[in-house]
Image (cartoon, rainbow, N blue to C red):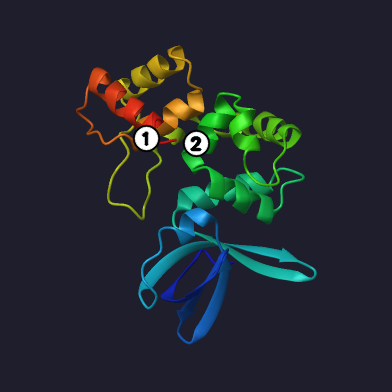
Amino acid sequence: MLAFVKGRLIETGTDYVVLDNQGIGYLIYTPLSVLENLPPIGQDIKIYTYMYVREDQLTLYGFLTRDDLEIFKLLIGVSGIGPKGALGLLSRISPNEFRFAVMSGDSKTIAKAPGIGPKTAQKLIIELKDKLKLEDMFEASTEADADVSHGGSGAEKETIMALVALGYSETEAFRAVQKADASPETDSETLLKLALKQMLTF
């Protein structure tokens, strides 16, 4: 089992990358979130991988963070969700947005992913709700990014509650708070103003 592949990026496609590691080219299928955050061709990159093995298939799927990989493994562990469906979902929403959608029962957000209908979205919520933790949602940070998440501060939680009271869905509120340009010291009033600005960009 390959935990990760580190090598020179030599090619990208609509849903894959090719890394050169000691003269061996690894074709790795990835979600859109990976393709949007790649370094220039020719630079080194580390991809966390999952090897999908079937009688007639041996495929590598890859992610920039362990967090993405863990959510991918949870998704394909649900009957009816294959690797392509999991990649499609992670191309549409981030791991934290998916966690929030599952924990808040927001099937509409999950169903927006290609190949995921309302019934499948409900199934994902039912099967994964007990496997996801609130602290994971707030504490998960992106290893590929130097910025650390705000860690689920009281201001974040208060702002999410305020946005929900204003009529936004919990998932939309969480996404806006995470994207707001705020520091860990930002108070809830300022964070709410920043989050509302983010709402205008959705």
Tell me where residue 90 appears, x and y as whole percent: 56, 48
Q: How many marks?
A: 2
Query: Helix, strand, or loop for circle 2?
Result: helix
Residue at the extreme top of the image, as rendered: 165
Residue 30 horizontal/vertical position (percent): 55, 61
Q: Which quadrant is the C terminus positioned in? A: top left
Q: What type is the residue that disc 2 sits on?
A: Glu
Which residue was labeled with disc 1?
A: 178
In the orientation shown, which residue stands out farthest toward the front?
200
The residue shown at (36%, 52%) is: 143
Q: x, y percentage for residue 124?
A: 67, 35
Secondary structure of the residue carrying tag 1 is: helix
- For residue 42, above or below residue 174: below
Which residue is drawn at the image coordinates 49% and 23% (left, top)? 170
From where the camera sits, is residue 53 visible?
A: yes
Q: Which one is in front, 114 or 45?
A: 114
Of callouts 2 and 1, the N-terminal one: 2
Whole-angstrom CA distance, mark 2 to mark 1, is 9 Å
Q: Residue at x 43, y 14 (%)?
A: 166
| Res. 140 image quadrant | top left
The tag on residue 97 is 2
